[in-house]
Every structure is written in C-alpha cells, then in structure tokens.
Amino acid sequence: MAHKYLKEEHEIFRESVRKFLDKEVRPFFHEWEKQRSTPKDLWGKFGEQGFLVPWAEEKYGGFNADFAYSVVLIEEFEKVASGIGTGLHNDIIVPYIATYGTEEQKDRWIPKCVSGEWSTAIAMTEPGAGSDLGNIQTRAVKKGDHYVINGEKTFISNGLKANLVIVACKTDMNAGHKGISLIVVEEGTPGFKRGKKLEKIGQHAADTSELIFEDAIVPAENLLGQENKGFYYLMEKLQQERLVCVIQAQTAAEESLKMTIEYVKQRPMFGKTLSSLQNTQFKIAEMATEVELGRMFLDDLIVQHMANKDVATQVSMAKWWTTEMAKRVIGQCMQFHGGYGYMEEYPIARRYRDIAVTSIYAGSNEVMKQIVAKRLGL
C-alpha cells in the first residue's frame, strides 16, 4: 500500500532498513526473546546505519530527516521485532532534548544518542501513578547547584540499559500537575539505581524495569526547560508518542493479516483449504476492511502531523480505535491458525501477546476517550 507522504528516497531507505534487519535482527530475535534481552552492541549497529535519531541536525550527526523516515523505521522494526525501543528513543525521548534543551545540553547528549553510544528512557510511571501524571510522588529538591531526587519509577521501557533517563518529578509537591519538572539523569549518577527487571507477558526482548532514586545528586543544569513546566512539555509531545503507538499497532495488524491469508490458503480443512470456506472468507473480508480503514486514518494523520497541525484529538481517537482494532484482528488471526497459533514457533503467537500492551501504554485507551470527550466540549 503506497503511503502518500513517501517519496523515492524514503523507499530506498526502507530497503536498506529491511536488508539490515533481515541480516542482523530477524534470525536472532526468537533467541533474544528467550534471553529476555538484546545484545549490547546492537544499538551501536543501529547508529552506524543512521537508524537512530535521523531527524537530528547534521552538527549532531543526524541528517535532518523528515518524519516520514521515522515512519519507515517504526514500520520496518515492527514487522520484525516488537518493542526493541528505537521508536521510543528516536521519536519520543530525544525530541524532548531537541525541543526543550539548551545548546549545551544538545551538544552534550544528542550526538551520543545518534551514534548509538547511548540509549534513552523516559521515567513517568510510578507504582501509584500511571496515566494520572499529576499524582507522581518522585520529588526533586534544589540544593545549591544540584537537585536531590527521591522516588521510584516502574514499567520503564529500556530502563535497564538506558544511559540517559528523562525523569518526571515534582519540584513543587503542592501544585499537582503544575509542579512537575523534567530532569535528565545520566548513568552513574550517585543515588540512581536500577530496580528489578520486570517480567511481561509480551515484548520479551525489550527490557522493562524499575528505577530507584535515593538521594540521587543531579546537577541543576540537567533541568530540561523551565522548572514546573514539565507537564506542559509532556502534553506537547504526547501527540507524536501516541502516533508512534498507532503506527506500530497498524503495522502489527497488517502483518498478522498478511501471514494469516497465506496460512489459510495452505491449511487443509474437510478436504478443501481453510480459505475456501465461507466463514473464513467473510471474516478475512471484515478484517481487511478494518485494517484498510486504520491505514487510511493513520496516513491522513501522518500528513497532518508532518505539516505541524494540532491533531491531538484525532490522534487520541486513532490510538484507542487502532489498538483495539489490532487486538481484535490479531485475536481472530490467531484463531485461524488453530492449535498452531498457540505455539511460540508461529509468529502469530508473538503478535497476540505483544499487541495487548498497546491499549495500555502511551496513555490508556480509557484516557484517550476522556481526551476526545473533553475536546468535543463534553
């Protein structure tokens, strides 16, 4: 399906991403899932290929790429390996530094994020605060030329390996969401520890962990933007974060449908193939229609997002609708695989367990509906 925002150079780039993943990721991914981690040198390989933060300015090592390059990367990575973290790094975390960072901060951090020397994480969620960000309890107290951070974060994607973590914390404990600041914590910071690696039902090769701050001493110059403005920065960037989630879910649905169509054509059933049965044909026609609708909606949103339009309402709609659609479609695709669909060696099994989280992270689907309702004036 041709995306209307893609030019020839994007498709050439897609081919190079695909070749790299076929050689360096696809053959080993099943093993990495069993090990519950990816190799340490993988991030450096991504950097060498230009797959990390391609939109960064040339002076930081990037190539000023437009968002369509990010779309290509998100789609191709999703086809091979859910949750490996490049979309998070490229299009969710590093943009905070590029937008709100000082020149000195950008010079210090972005080149390492582009080269793959550093990987990143963002620490928002806490044991008692998920989608309700105003309720976070991690606090940062300014003392002279540094902050002292205390608190605990959980469900942090890439938390075990990240060299740089953007931490949402309260600099004013009495101001609710108006008291949140973003502070960048580097690996090796005194008082910053990794908690346990969390066991998830899906996205096994992607590490998710707890992060603990016990009197962590962070230089005051690591504050991102202004104090107490963190919530507003998060809100500004969530449109793109949710769009990344929609791209991943849409791609997962497309891939699952494709593999299922191939499977039912070969699967014998009552002396025919499974694909020749009317139930199969009707179900697949229904799924193909939903997947097509999702793609049309998504492509339109990408075009508008690339034109810097405020599509937060529509992105919130797409986030809940597309992830629910993908869960429905992938569940049905698994059903068509019968007993084999429940076996780990069949890729549909991984799709089934990996898709579940998409309706939870980047703001739960219930929160998406709240946002839509609010923006409709309810």
Image (spheres, helix red, strand yellow):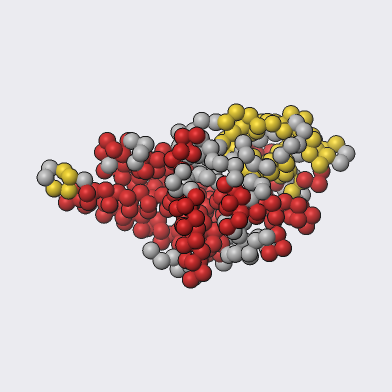
Residue at 77 percent across and 33 percent down: it is 190
Residue 322 as seen in the image, left or right of residue 125: left
Front in this rendered view, residue 254 or 127: 254
Residue drawn where x is 60% and y is 64% of the image = 65
The furthest residue to the right: 144
Q: What residue is at 52 percent from the left and 45 percent from the top?
A: 84
User: What is the x, y in percent for residue 346?
Assistant: 34, 41
Q: Is residue 81 above or below residue 159?
A: below
In the image, 348 versus 221, the foreground residue is 348
Q: Is residue 96 left or right of residue 356?
A: right
Residue found at x 27% / y 42%: 337
**Exactly how many numbered labels are in the figure?**
0
35 over 101 or under it: above or below: above
Q: Is residue 68 left or right of residue 171?
A: left
Q: Is residue 281 left or right of residue 354?
A: left
Please say whether residue 140 is visible from this viewpoint: no
Task: Tell which residue pokes out farthest to the bottom in this image.
Answer: 8
x%, y% of residue 328? 35, 44
Q: Is residue 297 visible?
A: yes
Q: Where does the N terminus fall, quadrant-wise?
A: bottom left
Residue 38 higher or lower than 259, as above or below = above
- x, y percent for residue 188: 74, 37
